[in-house]
């Protein structure tokens, strides 16, 4: 009877003890989840040619199957970490007892009793806190791992999970970082070195302590001989080999602003998987072009710093886009990513100055103007009516705007209700403070004449200019006032470059993109992007604008780009006080934008214009980017005709005309009258004469904006 009572008591006690032990230990992870084990993997980013340009990771790691791990690597790990690995069942009582005796003798805990399986359990499932509960969980998990997985599977997980120092998680990355080799190519001494590092990666690193690393390698080799994995001859030969590491790291030093742009874009979609999932990201970046961009960019900006002797380095940005696809081929968002991650291609909004005239004249061509339209480049004065700049009636020549009494009288008559704050005068000027009188639209554009651009904007309305700018790709808010003609609204370099690119692409807008496709670590496609095409302009308009922009390069403010020695089109831009210098230009293959300026918007200095500061950067980059590519010209589309024009009148040239050149027109908009050599000008007393912008040079469908303004008083 007593025996049964004792047994019953023992059962109850055991049940309560086990129940309390389970509560004490808490939830134990399920090792079965390792059946589809994949360590935290490194994401690779490739350029357009499939070359790795960067990696993203929280722990730099690549999965390596057991079949690719050298036998010497396995033997070295087993010899130094767990000699009875192939005999025990997860925990090793002999090893635990031996470690305890050694620690008692030495008076410290220098020897560890954990097996390879226990170490793996700790790394994958448990916290690093050294508690009794954790050690019990570790033992239970190790037994379960040995029950569910083979020794080879456990070793594979161990070697792919362990940290080898110097940012190397897993054996594959360690082989790359320390020896620039694939795992399968490691020799005996290299395997022993890596196995020796594990105990204390920073202490035994061959980069930091080569002598300690060599001593530790000798210990591993001796253990391998003791266990019988290698012969004495093999040990001696390997032990005598010098430590010969060859560090190889892939970092984000290359194209850092582009890589950061990719990272930020994809992080929204993939979250932590971007850093741990071993994704493969194929991009549009061309490594050769990116190298050229970074080199040219720094060369020119360093030279600028030397010239102006500024204590603050000048900043800048560059983006190059393939015209047919919208693929970003090169991107430089600033001079030093380490000190400033601000991406001036995507994030900096600056006034584009005269570069915005591209949209003014595109809108004009779409609305009936031609390169031969005559525009008055004469002084004007505007006053602020509270919402926009309004032309002061009566200010028709330069003497008027210089006469203060005259202006006061005009203000008194035309704006008696205005407040003092609103009585602000604006007298726009050209860069050289000169006025040219009546000029061809072509000359006004090539010479970047401000007054002419303002008058064209006034004719077609700022709202029309803004409409076409947005149609072409400008996304920033545009203030629809007369000053829009001179680039008063801020834009990013990316959007203005992309928008201008539709002119190079026959009026077809392609949205800029950087990621071609993303694959998971099994090679499955997660996303794939293709060029998007939208017809936004008539191809004839795009060609006329390209022809005008070629004139800017050949005869105007972008003459530095002639060094390219191939057909190119482009426009300079300079803001007030030379705070910003721009050049946006293209060839049939590429469109590229360059901006130079200070982040605090201070002046670049006297005469530091887009043509002098930004255009040389553009030209030198394009010289490198287009090396080996054919020199092709822009092909006129259907309904483009060429006519001999008198450059003084904008009319058809007679045989006796002195100033003759060949001009491009959209069929039906070419002049119908021959030049008499005189420029007719509109005034109240000569209302029956040919007006400055003549309906003779426009077809009936396209003449309305220009005719309406001419009938109302001309420019």
Image (cartoon, rainbow, N blue to C red):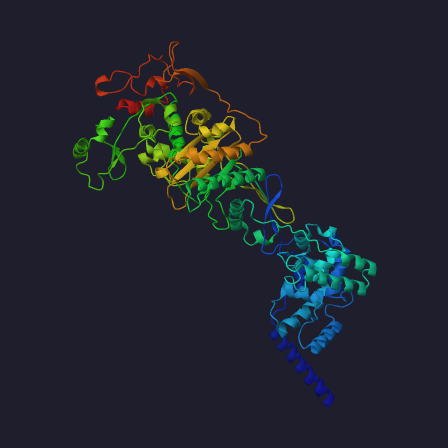
> On the rendered structure, is 415 left or right of 242?
left
Q: Nearer the viewer, residue 547 or 439?
A: 439
- Specify whether residue 154 is in view: no
Q: Quadrant of residue 98?
A: bottom right
> On the rendered structure, is 227 left or right of 542?
right
Q: Is residue 438 above or below residue 133?
A: above
Q: Nearer the viewer, residue 88 or 649?
A: 649
Q: Quadrant of residue 199?
A: bottom right
> On the rendered structure, is 500 left or right of 195?
left
Q: Is residue 492 above or below residue 147?
A: above
- Specify whether residue 184 is in view: yes
- Locate residue 713, reporting x and y percent: 26, 24
- Locate residue 383, reporting x and y percent: 24, 35
Q: Please identify the residue farthest to the bottom as the structure is shown.
A: 2
Q: Nearer the viewer, residue 390 or 486?
A: 486
- Locate residue 497, reporting x and y percent: 46, 36
Q: Nearer the viewer, residue 248 or 42?
A: 248
Q: Quadrant of the N terminus?
A: bottom right
- Locate residue 562, reporting x and y percent: 48, 27
> On the rendered structure, is 477 left or right of 383?
right
Numbered-mark total: 0
Q: Is residue 364 above or below residue 669?
A: below
| Residue drawn at (19%, 39%) of the image | 418
| Residue drawn at (56%, 54%) of the image | 272
Q: Please identify the residue farthest to the top as the structure is shown.
A: 655
Q: Quadrant of residue 440?
A: top left
Q: Quadrant of the C terminus?
A: top left
């Amino acid at each position: 009877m007593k025996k049964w009572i004792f047994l019953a008591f023992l059962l109850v006690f055991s049940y309560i003890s086990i129940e309390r032990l389970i509560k004490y230990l808490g939830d134990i992870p399920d090792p079965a989840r390792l059946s589809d084990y994949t360590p935290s993997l490194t994401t690779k980013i490739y350029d357009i040619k499939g070359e790795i340009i960067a990696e993203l990771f929280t722990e730099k790691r690549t999965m390596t199957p057991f079949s690719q791990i050298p036998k010497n690597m396995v033997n070295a790990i087993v010899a130094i970490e767990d000699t009875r690995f192939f005999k025990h069942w997860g925990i090793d009582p002999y090893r635990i007892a031996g470690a305890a005796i050694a620690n008692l003798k030495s008076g410290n805990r220098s020897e560890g009793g954990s097996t390879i399986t226990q170490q793996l359990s700790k790394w994958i499932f448990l916290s690093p806190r050294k508690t009794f509960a954790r050690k019990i969980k570790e033992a239970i998990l190790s037994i379960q791992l040995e029950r569910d997985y083979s020794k080879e599977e456990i070793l594979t997980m161990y070697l792919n999970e362990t940290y080898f120092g110097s940012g190397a998680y897993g054996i594959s990355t360690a082989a790359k970082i320390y020896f620039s080799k694939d795992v399968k190519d490691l020799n005996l001494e290299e395997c022993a070195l890596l196995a020796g590092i594990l105990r204390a990666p920073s202490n035994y690193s061959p980069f930091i302590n080569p002598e300690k690393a060599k001593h530790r390698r000798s210990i591993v080799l001796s253990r391998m001989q003791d266990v019988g994995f290698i012969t004495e001859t093999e040990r001696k030969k390997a032990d005598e080999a010098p430590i010969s590491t060859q560090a190889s790291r892939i970092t984000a030093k290359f194209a850092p602003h582009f890589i950061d742009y990719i990272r930020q874009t994809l992080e929204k979609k993939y979250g932590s998987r971007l850093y741990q999932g071993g994704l493969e990201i194929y991009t549009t970046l061309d490594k050769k072009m990116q190298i050229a961009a970074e080199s040219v960019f720094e060369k020119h900006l360093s030279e600028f710093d030397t010239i102006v002797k500024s204590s603050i380095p000048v900043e800048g940005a560059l983006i190059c886009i393939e015209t047919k696809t919208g693929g970003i081929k090169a991107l430089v968002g600033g001079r030093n990513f380490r000190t400033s991650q601000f991406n001036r291609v995507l994030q900096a909004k600056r006034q584009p100055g005269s570069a915005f005239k591209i949209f003014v004249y595109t809108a004009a061509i779409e609305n009936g103007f031609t390169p031969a339209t005559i525009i008055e480049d004469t002084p004007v004065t505007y006053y602020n009516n509270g919402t926009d700049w309004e032309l002061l009636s009566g200010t028709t020549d330069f003497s008027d705007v210089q006469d203060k009494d005259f202006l006061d009288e005009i203000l008194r008559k035309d704006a008696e209700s205005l407040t003092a704050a609103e009585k602000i005068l604006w007298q726009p000027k050209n860069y050289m403070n000169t006025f040219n009188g009546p000029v061809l639209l072509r000359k006004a554009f090539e010479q970047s004449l401000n007054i002419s651009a303002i008058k064209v904007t006034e004719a077609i309305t700022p709202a029309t200019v803004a409409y076409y700018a947005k149609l072409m790709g400008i996304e920033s808010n545009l203030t629809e006032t007369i000053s829009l003609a001179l680039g008063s609204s801020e834009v990013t370099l990316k959007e203005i470059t992309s928008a201008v690119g539709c002119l190079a692409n026959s009026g077809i807008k392609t949205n800029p993109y950087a990621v071609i496709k993303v694959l998971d670590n099994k090679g499955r496609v997660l996303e794939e992007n293709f060029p998007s095409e939208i017809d936004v302009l008539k191809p004839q308009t795009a060609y006329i604008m390209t022809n005008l922009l070629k004139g800017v390069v050949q005869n105007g403010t972008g003459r530095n780009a002639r060094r390219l020695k191939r057909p190119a089109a482009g426009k300079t831009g300079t803001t007030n006080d030379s705070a910003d210098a721009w050049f946006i230009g293209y060839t049939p293959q590429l469109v590229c934008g360059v901006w130079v300026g200070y982040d605090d918007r201070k002046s670049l200095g006297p005469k530091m214009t887009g043509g002098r500061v930004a255009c040389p950067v553009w030209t030198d980059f394009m010289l490198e980017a287009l090396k080996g590519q054919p020199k092709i010209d822009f092909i006129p589309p259907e309904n483009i005709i060429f006519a001999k024009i008198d450059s003084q009148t904008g009319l058809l040239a007679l045989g006796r005309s002195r100033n003759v050149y060949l001009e491009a027109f959209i069929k039906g908009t070419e002049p119908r009258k021959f030049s008499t050599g005189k420029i007719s000008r509109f005034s109240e007393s000569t209302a029956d004469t040919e007006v400055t912008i003549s309906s003779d040079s426009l077809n009936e469908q396209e003449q309305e904006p220009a005719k309406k303004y001419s009938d109302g008083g001309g420019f």
